Every structure is written in structure tokens, then in C-alpha cells.
Image (cartoon, grey):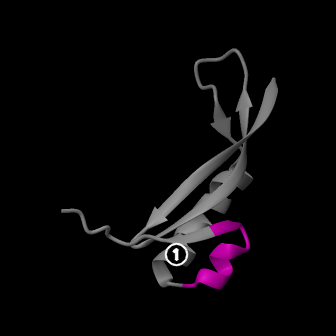
């Protein structure tokens, strides 16, 4: 069983958060997968972003605001 760090992006509305998680790789057909703790972490970040609670979301990683770009 191998573990490696990966940055995942959680997107809700006009916000996105970069969250570092650990992927678990093995020789089964279910690989790679997240630990239950990392899956809950991503859920918590999405919930915080959905509610507009940027302070709580920022505890897990960087938070960005998405803005439309005018193109002509």
C-alpha cells in the first residue's frame, strides 16, 4: 500500500478551495482512494463554502473567489 499527497479542489458557487489530501494506492481495482477523514474534510470544506463561511473553509486550505473574465 502506497500513500501520496494530492491537491484536490472543492468548488461551490463562486468559491473554490485547494485542499491537500492523501491518496491511498494499492493493487486492487479500487485504487486510488481517499481515507474517510479526507473525504469528510472535503465535505466540510464544501459545506463551509456553500454557506459562505470562508473562515471555516480556510482552515483546510487556500480559498479563491471565482470571477467571470470579460473577453472580446
Residue 53, image x, y percentages: 57, 84
Q: Using the image as rendered, state which of residue 28 and residue 15 is in the foreground.
A: 15
Q: Using the image as rendered, state which of residue 62 and residue 24 is in the foreground.
A: 62
Position of the N terminus, as image quadrant, is top right
Position of the C terminus, as image quadrant, is bottom left
Residue at 63 percent of width and 74 percent of height:
57
Q: Where 50 sits versus 26, above or below?
A: below
Residue at 53 percent of width and 67 percent of height:
46
Q: Where 5 sits versus 13, above or below?
A: above
Residue at 47 percent of width and 62 percent of height:
11
What range is drawn magenta here? 53-62
Q: Quadrant of residue 40?
A: bottom right
Residue 29 placement, left or right of 36: left
Outermost residue, left side: 72
Residue at 58 percent of width and 64 percent of height:
17
Residue 66, image x, y percentages: 43, 70
Q: Quadrant of residue 69?
A: bottom left
Outermost residue, top side: 27
Q: Using the image as rendered, state which of residue 72 and residue 46 is in the foreground.
A: 72
Residue 50, image x, y percentages: 46, 76
Residue 45 placement, left or right of 69: right
Q: Which residue is mark 1?
A: 49
Residue 60 inside the magenta-drawn segment = yes
Q: Quadrant of residue 61?
A: bottom right
Amino acid at each position: 500500500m502506497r500513500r501520496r499527497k494530492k491537491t484536490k479542489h472543492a468548488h461551490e458557487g463562486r468559491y473554490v478551495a485547494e485542499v491537500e489530501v492523501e491518496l491511498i494506492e494499492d493493487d486492487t481495482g479500487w485504487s486510488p482512494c481517499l481515507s474517510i477523514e479526507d473525504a469528510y474534510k472535503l465535505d466540510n470544506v464544501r459545506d463551509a463554502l456553500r454557506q459562505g463561511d470562508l473562515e471555516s473553509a480556510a482552515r483546510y486550505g487556500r480559498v479563491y473567489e471565482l470571477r467571470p473574465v470579460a473577453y472580446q
